[in-house]
Image (cartoon, rainbow, N blue to C red):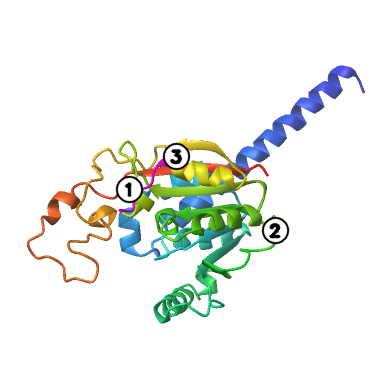
Amino acid sequence: MTASRRQALGLAAAAALVLTSAQGAQAADAALAKAVASETRPAADRARDKFRNPAESLSFWGLKPGQTVVEVSPGGGYWTEILAPYAMATKGRYVAGVADLANPKLSDGARKARADFEARFADTARYGKIEYVGFGATSGPLGAPGSADLVLTARNIHNWMWAPGMLPKVMNDFNAVLKTGGVLAVEEHRSDPRPMAADGRDGYVSEAAVIAAAEAAGFRLDARSEINANAKDTKDHPFGVWTLPPSRRSSAPGAQPAPDFDRARYDAIGESDRMTLRFVKVR
């Protein structure tokens, strides 16, 4: 075989590899687009997409087919409705870190919330086989060491700042379950440019506080995005971030909604200004 012939074959092989990679990326994008566009998602979730930008956020965080994704404290299941079908379609794994049933102090309300969550996502034909792991102040590992490709936490960090030692424990749990080079994906209400309230009690957290907590646990900030920024959010609301949609609080916790509250003013802001950060496990 001549040198020119070998060179031509090599170029053809390289081109085929590039084409295969591009086709794989397109297929991954198609799977994600399909999961986001699914009409089986709750209408209320789909209405929030303009604020939460799911396809753009997950692409920024580096979601890929076949990955093991651990979502911690999935709340109402906004991301579960996307990530579980995506994992099923791409032969990945979706793990939900939910209330830790091994905690003897776990409230009846928390136990019921977990049971309701599992019942909601029990349809394996729709969601695949969702895996569950206990998560909380006294919980064990989120999985085998180095078993996850991506850990996602969305709008939770402020809650973990309120209990002494909780945030470091959480970050160390994230680090332990991730592979070296794995991604910690963070979405959180952002206090900047104003100073963060003590312990983030109003729900807003500074980027510096999140970065410092992640770095202390062995992560490096890889990228930040303004995908979920909202310049309308003045961050000085009477009931903190919960004044805004979707919580739309108009009175103190436990009190009846205030009928004369100026709801339209806060609805016009929309959901909060949020940081969108991607960390990589480096140690």
Judged from the image, the secondary structure of the residue bearing numbered disc 3 is: helix
Part of the protein shown in magenta: 202-207
Vertical placement of 171 versus 100: above or below? Answer: above
Disc 3 to disc 2, C-alpha distance: 27 Å
Disc 3 to disc 1, C-alpha distance: 13 Å
The answer to whether any part of residue 66 appears in the image is no
- The residue sitting at the left extreme is 260
Which residue has dot 3 on it?
Answer: 208
Which residue has dot 1 on it?
Answer: 197
Depth order, front residue of 275/201 = 201
Kindly report which numbered mark, 3 or 2, lies closer to the viewer in this rendering: 3
Q: Is residue 206 magenta?
A: yes
Q: Earlier in the sequence, mark 3 or mark 1?
A: 1
Name which residue type carries label 1.
Ala
Q: Earlier in the sequence, mark 3 or mark 2?
A: 2
- The residue sitting at the right extreme is 1
Disc 1 to disc 2, C-alpha distance: 35 Å
Judged from the image, the secondary structure of the residue bearing numbered disc 2 is: loop
Q: Earlier in the sequence, mark 1 or mark 2?
A: 2
Label 1 crowd (10 A; few <14 / some 14-19 / many >=20): few
Judged from the image, the secondary structure of the residue bearing numbered disc 1 is: loop
Name which residue type carries label 3.
Ala
